[in-house]
Every structure is written in C-alpha cells, then in structure tokens.
C-alpha cells in the first residue's frame, strides 16, 4: 500500500497537479506568465497561496485583444480574479487595456504611484481612475510591500524615487558606476514607474516597468541596493533609454526575458548590455526584434513569437529553493535552472 501511495504522489508531482487537501501551499511553485501584448506589459504572477498579481494591462483597442490574452493566461493559471493590479505608470501600452480587462474579470486592489506626472485629463489616466473606484486602492512608495499572500513583493521605485536603503543581499559598492554616463533628464511617467522585486524563498525576480536610465542609476550607484537577481524582466521592453550597464550587470541575472514587440523595444544597444551581463545563462524574448538583425536576437528556441502572427507567452515556475523552469509556450521548449548558492535572502 505504501508503494502505491508513493507512486500516486510522484505522478501528481510530474503532472503538475494542484496539491491535494492537506499539502502545504509552499510545495506549490510561484507561476509567472509574461503575456504577449505586442510591446506593452502584462505580467501575471500567481503565488503558491493562489493569490494573483497582474503587472500592467497592455494596450487598449484591437477588440479587447490584450484583455483576452490576459484572461487566457489566468485560465491557464487557474485563477478567476486579479487580487492585486499594479499599474507601473499611466502610458497607453501599460494601462490602456484596463477597461476591457475590468469588464471581464474582478479586480481587488489597484496599486499605483499616485497622481500622474503628465496630463491629468489623458483618457488613459481618467479611465484608470474610474476603474479604480470598483476596488481598493494602494499607493506605494519605495520600501513598501505589496501584500500578496505567500510572496515578498518589495517596491523599489515609485514616483521618481528609489529605495532609501539596501535590500538583504545588496549594499556592495558597484564598480560599474565609474563609467556611468547620464542621459538627458526624463520628466515623463516612465521615470516614475513602480518597480518591484518579487521573492519566493530563494528565488528573486525584478520588474521595473519602464523606469529610465537616470532613475535606475539611483538603484545601482554608488552601491547596488538590490543585489543578485535570478530573473530580470528587461526594463522598458529593451529600449536603450533604460537598463544602464551598472544596474543590469550589478543584478548578475541568471536569466533575462525581454517583453518586446516585433517592432517595439529590442534595441541592439540594450540587448548587448543584457547579453554581456556577467553570469547570464540564457536570454529569452517575447518577439524577434525584426529591425535588430540576427546578431541582436537570441536563438529561435528562446523566442516565443517569431513574428506578429502569434501571441504566445513565456511561463516561469519557481520553487522555494531558487530553482526555476522557463517554458516557451510556442514550441514547449523548457529549461530548468538549478538553485544558485548563496542567493540573497536565504
């Protein structure tokens, strides 16, 4: 009888069946879906507890295209509501899909950086304020936590400010700061993006929205406030106005995912900064960057959408020990990354 029970449990693990009654939630992975919204952002995070957090909602229009893609990812993840919606900033490709999404699924808490720094009568912003009335509201500042049960989600940037002190594992002087060159000042919403570090046990992921070069510098210099990262979602879709080497190389990411569109983001300069990051094992992309050429795109197996005719996601499943698996839903290619010894916060 014992052998039968052991075999049954093993089959459930292999098939990724949800835990049976009595199993601890911590045995379940953290699941992350990088949804293809054609160069915007929509990142669905599902905690081992079953609570969900969506970072941004993609574009408006296209007959509700992006809302439908998000809802499809939710169904795959087994969730029927968004517990926390983080709107990193109020640009069309990040907040524009909200009205269509809110018409499809319930949203519990709306998380943002506060009032817009651009035109307060912008229809995208006013539509966001209207939708926000249907749920709770959480305005965050650097150092705050977004209380997703089963995860540690720390806000590292918001409203143009960055962390006042280092996270565990950060604080080391960053030699990359010596060659940092500032870019022209950015007064847009991009520089005010809500950025966060998502931690599940020893696994750490960073998502900085569209945070731009000079503000990112404050996270990296003179000391690296965040420390090593397992998974880096490239800032600003891989645009060369974001992702300074001091920051990206300071992260020492094991894996990077670029949420670019076929003709949005994916700049050769930004791609090279990520590719040259020390210790990087693999670089995944939502799309082939059509204008970048073969030298500035990763291998085909790591690209979810070779052109704009498909809308495949990239899925990440992370365990508490820091191991994680990345899957290309286009071709079912998957790769598992072992835990990294000495990861911050163990």
Image: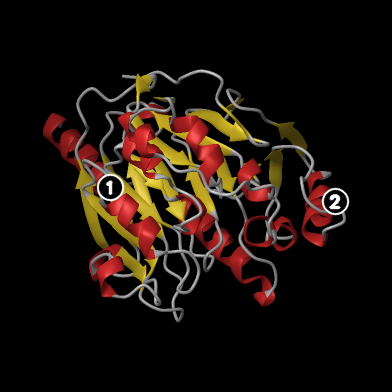
| Residue ID at (32%, 51%) | 274
277 horizontally vs 244: left or right: left
Please say if the residues under marks 2 and 1 sit with CB atoms less than 8 Å apart. Answer: no
Q: Which mark is residue 325?
A: 1
The foreground one among 154 and 171 is: 171
* Residue 68 screen position, x and y as percent: 60, 66
Q: Which mark is residue 120?
A: 2
* Residue 94 screen position, x and y as percent: 63, 56
Alpha-carbon neighbours of circle 1 within 10 Å: few (<14), some, or many (≥20)? some
> Residue 114 is drawn in which quadrant?
top right
> Residue 170 is drawn in which quadrant?
top left
Q: Secondary structure at mark 2?
A: loop
237 horizontally vs 193: left or right: left
From where the camera sits, is residue 22 visible? no
| Residue ID at (60%, 27%) | 142
Q: Nearer the viewer, mark 2 or mark 1?
A: 2
Q: Secondary structure at mark 1?
A: strand
| Residue ID at (27%, 50%) | 15
Q: Earlier in the sequence, mark 2 or mark 1?
A: 2
192 horizontally vs 257: left or right: right
* Residue 204 screen position, x and y as percent: 38, 33
């Amino acid at each position: 009888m014992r052998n039968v029970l052991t075999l049954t449990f093993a089959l459930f693990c292999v098939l990724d069946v949800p835990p049976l009654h009595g199993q601890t939630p911590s045995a379940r992975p953290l699941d992350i879906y990088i949804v293809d919204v054609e160069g915007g952002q929509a990142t669905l995070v599902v905690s081992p507890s079953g609570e969900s957090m969506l970072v941004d909602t993609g574009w408006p229009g296209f007959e509700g295209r992006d809302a439908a893609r998000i809802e499809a990812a939710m169904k795959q993840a087994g969730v029927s509501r968004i517990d926390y919606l983080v709107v990193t900033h109020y640009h069309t490709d990040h907040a524009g899909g909200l009205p269509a999404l809110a018409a499809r699924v319930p949203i519990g808490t709306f998380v943002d950086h506060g009032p817009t720094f651009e035109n307060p009568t912008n229809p995208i912003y006013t539509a966001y304020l209207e939708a926000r009335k249907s749920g709770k509201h959480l305005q965050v500042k650097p150092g705050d936590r977004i209380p997703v049960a089963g995860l540690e989600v720390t806000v590292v940037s918001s409203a143009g400010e960055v962390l006042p002190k280092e996270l565990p594992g950060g604080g080391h002087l960053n030699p990359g700061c010596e060659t940092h060159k500032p870019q022209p000042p950015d007064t847009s919403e991009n520089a005010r993006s809500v950025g966060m570090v998502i931690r599940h046990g020893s696994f750490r992921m960073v998502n900085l929205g569209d945070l731009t070069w000079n503000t990112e510098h404050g996270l990296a210099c003179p000391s690296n406030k965040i420390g090593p990262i397992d998974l880096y979602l490239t800032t600003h879709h891989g645009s060369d106005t974001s992702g300074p080497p001091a920051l990206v190389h300071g992260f020492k990411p094991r894996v990077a995912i670029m949420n670019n569109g076929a003709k949005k983001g994916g700049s050769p300069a930004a791609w090279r900064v990520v590719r040259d990051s020390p210790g990087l094992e693999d670089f995944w992309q939502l799309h082939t960057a059509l204008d970048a050429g073969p030298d500035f795109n990763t291998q085909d197996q790591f690209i979810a959408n070779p052109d704009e005719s498909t809308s495949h996601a990239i899925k990440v499943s992370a365990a508490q020990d820091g191991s994680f698996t990345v899957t290309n839903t286009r071709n079912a290619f998957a790769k598992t990354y072992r835990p990294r010894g000495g990861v911050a916060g163990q």
